[in-house]
Image: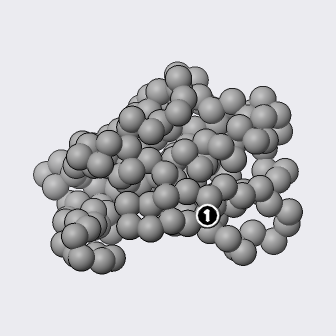
Amino acid sequence: MPHWSSLIRDIPDFPKPGIVFKDITPVLADARGFAAAIDAMAAPWREAVPDAFIGIESRGFIFAAALAHSLGAGFVPVRKPGKLPARTLAHDYALEYGSDRLEMHADALPPGARVVLVDDVLATGGTLRAALSLARQQGATVVGAAVLVELPELDGRARWDSDAPLHVALQG
């Protein structure tokens, strides 16, 4: 079987001209590829399983939920505005192609919970920074982040504002 990374395809000019979108859906559609990607993302956390994986909307949900199930941890969604029914905390951030806001339920994590942030692609680092801020607002201990693909040319890693490790399964 080819390495799961060969299943990721580039889509030029999506969602707007000049952006090269990393389409991970072929990885998700391939059972062995998806399992191998989850195994690669889970490897750094097997020895010290966190209390929860925080999945960033929307594709981060897929990986965080699978990691949580695989390692026996909880899953906490971080969503775009207006999607969570209870009281939320919010953080605004910049994207590669605009700006947005993320929200988390204000009671999603107990103080001191050990968490890992999860997203599919690390581009500018804005979404990871927003999720990091939300976890810290709740008093959680962010023990790291797990990302499927990093786009090093956008320097998102330089914006990772934590001493916790940032693990990337694939350099894009």
Q: Residue at x 59, y 50 (%)?
A: 130
In the depicted structure, whether residue 83 falls above or below residue 48? below
Compare residues 10 and 133 and report the one nearer the observer: 133
* Quadrant assignment, res 24: bottom left
Q: Residue at x 69, y 47 (%)?
A: 134
Q: Which residue is mark 1?
A: 101
The type of colouring in the image is one colour
Compare residues 160 and 146 and report the one nearer the observer: 160
Q: Is residue 85 left or right of residue 81?
A: right
In the depicted structure, whether residue 25 falls above or below residue 133? below
In the depicted structure, whether residue 4 falls above or below residue 17? above
Q: Residue at x 18, y 48 (%)?
A: 3
In the depicted structure, whether residue 95 falls above or below residue 76? below
Q: Is residue 86 left or right of residue 73?
A: right
Q: How many marks?
A: 1
Circle 1 Cα neighbour tier, 10 Å, few/some/many (<14 / 14–19 / ≥20) = some
Q: Amino acid under label 1?
A: Arg
Kindly state the secondary structure of the residue where label 1 is placed: strand
- Residue 54 appears at what percent x and percent y? 61, 48
Q: Residue at x 86, y 63 (%)?
A: 87
Residue 19 visible in rendering: yes
- Residue 19 appears at what percent x and percent y? 26, 68
- Residue 112 appears at what percent x and percent y? 78, 29
